[in-house]
Amino acid sequence: ALSRDLVDALASSDRLYLQYQPQVSIEERRVFGVEALLRWEHEVYGLIPPSVTVALAEDLQIVDRLGEHVLRLACRQRAAWGKSVADDLIVSVNISPRQLQDADFDLKVLRILAETGLEPSLVELEITESTSLAPATQAIGALLRLRNAGVRIALDDFGMGHTSLHYLRELPLDTVKIDRSLTFTSQGDLNEHVIRSIVALSRTLGLRAVVEGIEQPEQLPRFIDLGCARFQGYLFSRPLESGPCLDYIRANA
Ligand code: G
Ligand code: G
Ligand code: MN
Ligand code: NA
């Protein structure tokens, strides 16, 4: 069954790998980071979407191990790129809400950083809001300790579903990632007002705002008008294997 296969893939590992999607700063005209995205190449079913893989791992109660595997691969990759990319190029890694419930989450992250020798400030953890649950005190504590150690924290999928002004206040954040459901926007529509507010709010709070899911060149000027300068989306690049991603970074440095 698929469960058995995931356990095996985690053990033997080369079927679980990462792609990297560039994040671009328009002002600096360069790639400032990459988001690591999980891929599972199943021998029979082919590529399994990360949402399915993560949900399955949660059911099997191995999401902590899966998460550690992902973080380790991402940190190794960033360490391997070393000086061939900008000193401050960050790698961001998605963290499932379940991983944050692990009492040792912060220790595990710090252990992987120590093991890979990666500077903590080069890693950004992307946190998503779980259902309508407020972030647990324990999880906030872990994120605070990690941030004090220099790790960056991003709030992912911001502006989607149960919008989380609460999270903005409670979590130690560096970045908000504006959800791609807001990106098809035209002058004067509701999304435009929402984006304008998010950009203003993030500026007030001293946070970096990244707009996700930009696909068409026509979308870009509207966002620049709204004060957005950092983007991630197919317009710039799809998620890439590490080799092509390094080529992209170096071509846009
Ligand atoms: O890569 P893709 O667009 O198919 O990703 C779909 C969803 O899966 C996104 O919400 C993304 O955040 C999530 N995702 C991708 N990789 C990981 C991962 O390594 N861990 C977790 N928890 N979620 C991931
Ligand atoms: O939830 P999260 O923001 O982590 O989701 C990242 C996912 O969004 C990745 O699976 C990535 O493939 C997808 N993605 C990135 N850019 C675009 C885009 O421009 N359009 C669409 N439809 N999906 C995108
Ligand atoms: Mn993400
Ligand atoms: Na997102």
Image (cartoon, rainbow, N blue to C red):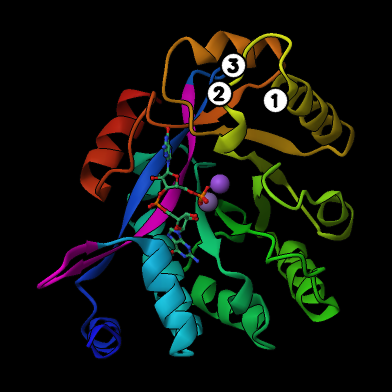
Query: Residue 6 at x, y = what percent?
Result: 28, 82
* Relative image position of residue 191 (x, y in whole percent): 70, 25
Residues shaded magenta: 30-47
Compute the Cα span from label 2 to label 3. 22 Å
Q: Which residue is mark 2?
A: 184
What predominant SS class does the magenta segment belong to? strand
**Residue at horizontal 60 percent and vertical 59 percent from the top:** 125
Magenta-drawn stretch contains 23? no
* Among the 4 quarters of the image, the one containing residue 217: top left
Helix, strand or loop at mark 2: loop
The three-letter code of the residue at mark 3 reads: Glu
* Badge 3 residue CB within 8 Å of ligand 2: no
In this figure, which residue is indicated by the disc labeled 1? 191
In space, the residues marked 2 and 1 are separated at their CA atoms by: 8 Å
Residue at disc 3, secondary structure: loop
Q: Which amino acid type is marked by label 1?
A: Asn
Does 2 sit above or below residue 143?
Answer: below
Residue in the picture at 80% in, 81% down? 138
Disc 3 versus disc 1: distance between alpha carbons?
23 Å
Q: Are marks 2 and 1 in contact (CB under 8 Å)?
A: yes
Question: Which numbered disc covers residue 27?
Answer: 3
